Every structure is written in structure tokens, then in C-alpha cells.
Image: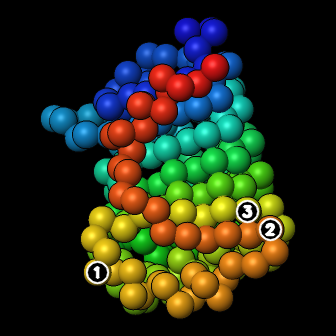
Amino acid sequence: MAQLSHLYVMDVDILNVLSAPLLSSLTINYLPQGSHTLSAQESITRFLHQSRCHLESLSVSAEIFTSAIPSRMFALEACSTISRLKLGLPPRMINGIVEAFTSPSVLPKLQHLILCISEPSQDECATILRMVRSRRDGGLLKLVEVQLMQDKYKHHLEEDIRATNGGDFEMRFEKWNPSFEDHFYLWHLP
């Protein structure tokens, strides 16, 4: 797999037997099936560490997040070059996951953040906005897309999103597009 640059997986167990040093784009649409010896996050972390790749794009579904916050995974050298991150955020874990991204030392080259959220509370929306402002003020983050499963949750964010925009930064709503559809964009890559 030495020449592999783009990878889409639905079962993280395959990562336990792969190494891809030239990998630049990874999409993980994890569908829990049966018992696993490692958690999804542990499998991903081990794969990235072993591959010693430098990702530019990472897309992960909400199912990879267990009770643990992914700080260790995103602190890896392989993630230090990510400029595009698409995250499925599971209900009741949004605050912890989002707070892990507040520090500009985590994913320091992040320019494009896509958040897929099914049912955000007002508190979770406030946490997301704090993180976005922190990253925006750090200077690198240019675009944040918020994808809500249901439009009825837009009212939690609409006014604040408008207030956040300005300069060379934009935050906007986009159509719901979960990570299991991400492999379609691979067909259009050069």
C-alpha cells in the first residue's frame, strides 16, 4: 500500500493490517460490527502512527467516538498537516470533542472544518461557536460548514453565525452530507 494516497474504510479493523506512508486523504465511515480488540479511535491512532503519513484531509463518522475524547488521535504528527476536517459529532459528546479543538496547537493547519450534527442543544451550539471564534482569531481557519440533520436546529446558530463572519472567514450552513457519502468525491479527484 506504499502508493496509496486516498483511503475510504467502513471497518476500522482493516487499518490494523495496513500501512500507507503516502496517504493524504482518509475517510472513515465506521459501522460497528461485532466485537473488536481495539476501539475505533485506538485502531485509527495506531494506523496513523504506524503509517507515518501526513494527512491533508480527514473525514470521520460520529460512530468512532466512544466515551473518550479524541485528543490523542488528533495530536499525532500525521494530523498536524490536516487542512480539511469533516467530523460527525455524536449527541451528548459534542462539547468534549469540540473543546479539544479550541487550542490552535491541535490541528494547527486546519482551514476548512465541516461539522455534521444531528441534534445540537443550545449549550452545544455555544461550545461550537466558542471553538470557531478561537480558531478564527488564531488566523488559519477560513471556512466552517455546519451540516444539520434537521433544519429545525438552525435557530440555535443562525444569528451567531452571521456575527462570526467577516474578513477572510466564513461560517455557513450546508446540506446534510454524512461521511458515508464522502467516497463519491474521490471519483472527481485528479
Measuring from the top left, give residue 99's x and y in whole percent: 57, 73
Label 3: state its secondary structure. loop
Q: Which numbered tag is attached to residue 39? A: none
Q: Which of the marked residues, 2 or 1, is nearer the chain's N terminus?
A: 1
Mark 3 lies on residue? 142
Give the residue at x 80% y 68%.
168
Mark 1 lies on residue? 152
* Amino acid marked by disc 1: Lys
| 26 to the left or right of 21 | left
Kindly report the distance in space between the C-alpha atoms of the residues bearing marks 2 and 1.
28 Å
The residue nearer to you, when weighing 177 against 106, is 177
Q: Which of the marked residues, 3 or 2, is nearer the chain's N terminus?
A: 3
Pick the quarter of the image with the N terminus: top right
The residue nearer to you, when weighing 106 against 57, is 57
Measuring from the top left, give residue 149's x and y in whole percent: 30, 65
The residue nearer to you, when weighing 82 against 64, is 82
Mark 2 lies on residue? 168
